[in-house]
Amino acid sequence: MSGESTKKDKVISKRIDRFFMGLESAYLFVKRFFKEVWFPPYEFKEVIRQCYQIGYNSLPLISLTGFIVGVVFTNQSRPSLAEFGATSWLPALISIAVIRAMGPLVTALIAAGKVGSSIGAEIGSMKVTEQIDAMEVSATNPFKFLVVSRVLASTFMIPILVLYTDFVALLGAFVNVHANEMTSLSTFFVQVFDALSFLDITSSLVKSVIFGFTIGIVGCYKGYNSTKGTEGVGKAANSAVVMAMFLIFIEELLSLQVTNFFRQL
Amino acid sequence: MIESVVQARNLVKSFDDLHVLRGVDLDLFRGENLVVLGKSGSGKSVLIKIMVGLLTQDEGSVKVLGQEVKDLNSKQLNELRLKIGFSFQASALYDSMTVRENLEFPLVRNVKNLSKQEKDKMVEEVLDSVGLLQTINQMPSELSGGQRKRIGIARTLILQPEIMLYDEPTAGLDPITCMDINNLINQVNEKYKTTSIIITHDLTCAKVTGDRVAVLLDGTFGASGKFEEVFENAEDGRIKSFYDYNFIKQ
């Protein structure tokens, strides 16, 4: 009996050890990023290539999702407002919901799935096929070339994608509002911008920067630390998505608290 | 007296409970091709990875071109690495780049003020020396295993290293391609005046390319010398069985 409990204790203690070692290694990885990002050589070409991969290649998916979000959210909100005879408030309601939360969140979750998994899988497969070692022995800093460039690109591109998603979602909402309430484009957008404050836009952008950084750094961390073999590459891609999504929700919650604090000032 | 370019003394390396190297001593002399033989998992690759600083030994010393590898800072280590070419077992070509970009990669990062013409000339020259100039715009996924090995060797040669480290250069290749790679190793040695360590478990490769062979057994060198000296009069059963197995295989 006591033997069994000792075994269980050992398993639990090993898990706790692994958890804290994982935290330490993630901390060191992030610290290394902030250390290396400032010093030359700067991999501008690679950053631009990654910006293209992350930004341009995500456009079709983001456009479709953003548009659908706008249409569906408008449709779902109408009955509640109609009960009070307040359908004219739809543009304001939608603009606040899209700009404050849905735009950044939807974009970040889609990017976590698309960009995070591809970064995790790409770096993971480079690791297991010794391509990262090959860079190192050819006197190139693989961290700078692979990690810094990708994290910078995702930090820079996600806010741009968020702005784009916001616009497309509002366009989707307009199509729906116009079809039902015959509201003109100019009236719709006047109501949209009237409802927004400077804090809404800045908090949305700051949040997007944090989401972008999270997606990039988690994808790179999981790929860079993937274990040997193809199974490890799959795991790296999968855990990059899961971890990034989890962190995005936590960051969303925290940013809400911070924004509310500033709103009350 | 011939200069020793790599000198390892009492090298010890373990991975958790697995003791891979248990006090390895090695001297590599300028201009020679040293073949390190051993079974899979005997620590051959670990040995050369320590030499380029990809792994760090637990105990002992490794001096490459007179410098103690583990004492070098990252800048000094990179300077040393420019003098060492490392050909990986699976070639390690960058999948997302063409053959030209793969070869340019170490060049643009380590040689300053190169014009496009000079860069192109160097890439074409080194590709020509491995006989694969026609693949210059192809992606690694479009190449055969033997071609990938050759391009991998070409990529290391572009910086004109003094020392070449080949990790299983003939692994996974058919006998004819193996022979081509063996000949290429000898040509590289002659043309670029390199000093090489060839890690393999292929005795044909060892015989064709090696000036000297050393057999890694249980974490130390069990025998070393010319191929014939080591194998033809071998008394150690493990070395004998290694030779017999390769002989039967052939």
Image: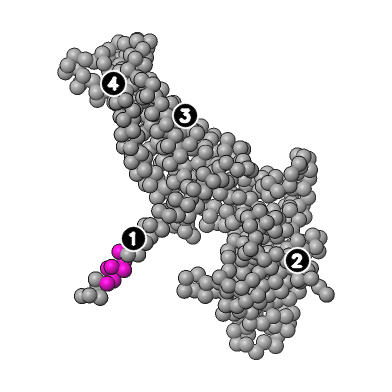
Residue linked to disc 2: B195
Residue linked to disc 3: A160
**Distance between the alpha carbons at the discs numbered 2 and 1:** 49 Å
* Residue B194 falls in image quadrant: bottom right
Q: Residues at marks 2 and 1, common chain?
A: no
x, y percentage for residue A7? 28, 71
Q: Which residues are magenta?
A: A6-12
Residue linked to disc 1: A16
x, y percentage for residue A126? 54, 52
Local SS, label 4:
helix
x, y percentage for residue A170? 36, 21
**Distance between the alpha carbons at the discs numbered 4 and 2:** 73 Å
Three-letter code for the amino acid on which mark 3 is drawn: Ile
Three-letter code for the amino acid on which mark 2 is drawn: Thr
Residue linked to disc 4: A93
Relative placement, left or right, of A99 versus B30 is left
Mark 3 Cα-neighbour bin, 10 Å: few <14, some 14–19, many ≥20: some
Instruction: Give the quadrant of the C terminus of chain B.
Output: bottom right
Local SS, label 1:
helix
Q: Residues at marks 3 and 1, common chain?
A: yes
Q: Report the chain holding disc 1.
A: A
Q: Is residue A234 visible?
A: no
Relative placement, left or right, of A135 versus B16 is right
Residue at 57%, 41% (x, y): give it: A38
Three-letter code for the amino acid on which mark 1 is drawn: Ile
Whether tag 2 and tag 1 are in contact, CB under 8 A, the answer is no
Task: Classify B56 as above or below A250.
Answer: below
